[in-house]
Structures are given as C-alpha cells and as structure tokens.
C-alpha cells in the first residue's frame, strides 16, 4: 500500500530528480526516490551487519583459547605466503 509523503528539497535536489527522470533513469520521480531509498536502506543494513560482526569479533578475540588458535592459524598462513613468495 502506497503512502503519500511531502518533503522540502533543495533546488539542487529537485532539479536532479527532474533531470534523472528526464534522462530515463527512472519512470518517474516516485520510482526514483523509492529506488534511492532502497539503495540507502541496503547500505544502512550492511553497515549495521558489519558493526554486529565487528562486535562479535572483538568479543571472540577476548577468549584466550580462541585468540591462541587464531594467532596460530594466522602465523601458519603467513609462513605459507612467505614460502610461496620465495618460490616466486
């Protein structure tokens, strides 16, 4: 169900909407605004997910056993990378 909203846009933003629709970027201004909102919502959700994952990572690295395992795996891969580089 569609809802009507009214916004005050700067002259620059209003002209950009009109120009993008005129260029065929969107069927009309409503579709353009909806697409831009979907794009920003996706960006917002990605940022939130990255923050959640970062918080989980920080929490996980506070566990000494997990940290030791992580450091051991990281060191092993570093050695493999050095060996591969030396083989060049």
Image (cartoon, rainbow, N blue to C red):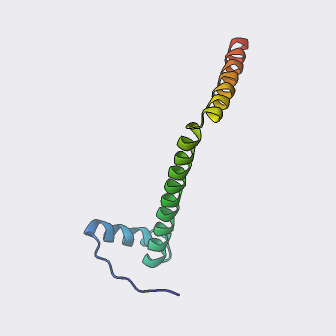
State the image coordinates of residue 43 (x, y, percent, origin top left). Answer: 50, 58
Determine whether, in the image, residue 33 is placed left or right of residue 53.
left
Considering only vertical position in the picture, is 21 above or below 86? below
Quadrant in which residue 33 is drawn: bottom left
Considering only vertical position in the picture, is 68 above or below 10? above
Q: Which of 33 and 85 is in front in this view?
A: 85
Q: Residue at the location (52% across, 60% down)? A: 45
Looking at the rendered image, the quarter that the C terminus falls into is: top right
Q: Nearer the viewer, residue 74 or 39?
A: 74
Determine whether, in the image, residue 6 is placed left or right of residue 24.
left
Q: Is residue 86 visible?
A: yes
Q: Residue furthest left?
A: 11
State the image coordinates of residue 82 (x, y, percent, origin top left). Answer: 67, 16
Q: Which of 24 and 6 is in front in this view?
A: 6
Q: Which residue lies furthest to the top in this view?
A: 86
State the image coordinates of residue 42 (x, y, percent, origin top left). Answer: 53, 62
Q: Is residue 25 visible?
A: no
Considering only vertical position in the picture, is 81 above or below 59? above
Q: Residue at the location (65% across, 22% down)? A: 75
Q: Residue at the location (43% across, 72% down)? A: 22
Q: Nearer the viewer, residue 19 or 70?
A: 70
Q: Residue at the location (54% across, 55% down)? A: 49
Determine whether, in the image, residue 11 is placed left or right of residue 50.
left
Badge count: 0
State the image coordinates of residue 35 (x, y, percent, origin top left). Answer: 50, 69
């Amino acid at each position: 169900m569609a809802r009507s909203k009214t916004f005050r846009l700067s002259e620059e933003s209003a002209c950009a909407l009109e120009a993008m629709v005129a260029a065929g970027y969107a069927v009309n201004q409503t579709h353009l605004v909806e697409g831009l909102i979907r794009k920003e919502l996706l960006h917002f959700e990605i940022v939130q997910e990255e923050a959640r994952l970062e918080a989980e990572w920080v929490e996980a690295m506070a566990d000494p056993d997990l940290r030791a395992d992580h450091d051991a795996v990281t060191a092993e891969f570093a050695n493999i990378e050095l060996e591969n580089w030396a083989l060049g």
